[in-house]
Amino acid sequence: MFDRVKRFFAAETKRSATGPLIALHQAGRPQWTPRNYAALAQEGFASNAIGYRSVRLIAEAAGSLPWLLYDGDREIAAHPLLGLLKKPNPGQPGREFGEQLYGFLLVAGNAYVEKVEIDGAVRELHALRPDRMKAVASANGWAEAYDYSVNGQSVRLPRENVLQLRLFNPLNDHYGMSPLEAAQRAIDTHNAASGWNKAMLDNSARPSGALVYAAGDGHLTMEQFERLKTELEESYQGASNAGRPMVLEGGLDWKEMGYSPKDMEYSAAKDGAAREIALAFGVPPMLLGIPGDNTFANFMEANRSFWRQTVLPMASRVGEAMTGFLCAGSLRLTHDLDQVEALSADREALWARVGKADFLTGDEKRAAVGYGARGEN
């Protein structure tokens, strides 16, 4: 009898059918992100102008969007939650908090928000560094907590106090994939091209070559060899000696070796890598000053495409996540797109089309452009 009751309740347990497979794979243990966050941040952001500017463009644009709060279809002008988003914590204004959050999401593929509650009300929000976080998988395979570690010390944060934002990653169940990881080869190419250019300048902007001694038996004495080597290093290498003519003694001849910048298509390779990095982030090359491949008629068109295809989808993702994390009942967080100057032309065109629709009532026209009803026809 007892066994039949156990089987009955076991059959009625509600949980994901695929969760146990993940649990078996992760074995219920914490898992560190497989990427080297420090390397991505250093090589793709701190050492690469294209990656740095792409992250800044998206983070600053998305972080500048004002928040709106709705209760169903009714906009709420004043609410403690709006005040919290304007000043998430004592050390940060809302815009800086947003830029940091989006920056972490772009560089690491993951971003984490911790909420601090007092007497059941959320008082502070903190953006946590993703390289210090690791998910603690439960028996069903999903994260049940997060460990935050700094300088060898760790604190466990309950799942309900942490919001994890992550970009799609087909290879990991718990962590997202950064655009920097997808563009890593292009970043390495771009950085290598910059390093090659610096090395060329350090070596008088010339490719490597060889001095050939053809006089006599073709051999230099050790004293002659050391004197020639010292003279080359002191008088002909370095940016300050660029273009200085070389004076060769009898029997010496310069033989150029290696490829010239033209042979290696140096500029084309670097610009191609830059465009690939911009593509991974969804930033039009025109906005980054990358020559060639500008498919937009003008800067305004490129900027509008940037907002529509990159900034707004990411901001919408964060808005939905913050709604589930902070709101209760029918409250809903979104952004005020009327404040986006880059979308003013689209907005004016929409208003003109709706205004000419005589078959719509006044309230229907307001609803069509995203405003609440006023109770008028």
Image (tube, grey):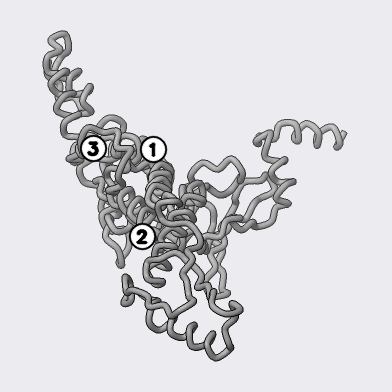
Query: Can residue 191 be seen from the camera position used here?
Result: yes
Q: Residue furthest top?
A: 359
CA–CA distance between discs 3 and 1?
24 Å
Q: Nearer the viewer, residue 373 or 359?
A: 359
Which structural element holds mark 3?
helix
| Quarter of the figure with the N terminus | top right
Query: Can residue 164 be seen from the camera position used here?
Result: no
Q: Residue, x 30% and y 33% (percent of image)? A: 295
Q: Residue, x 29% and y 59% (percent of image)? A: 96
* Earlier residue among tags 3 and 1: 1
List x then y, in percent, for residue 48: 40, 59
Which mark, residue 329? 1
363 relative position to 254: left or right = left
What amino acid is at disc 2? Glu
Residue that label 3 marks: 337
Residue that label 2 marks: 124
Q: Depth-wise, is mark 3 or mark 1 nearer the camera?
A: 3
Which structural element holds mark 1?
loop
Q: Residue, x 39% and y 47% (percent of image)? A: 268
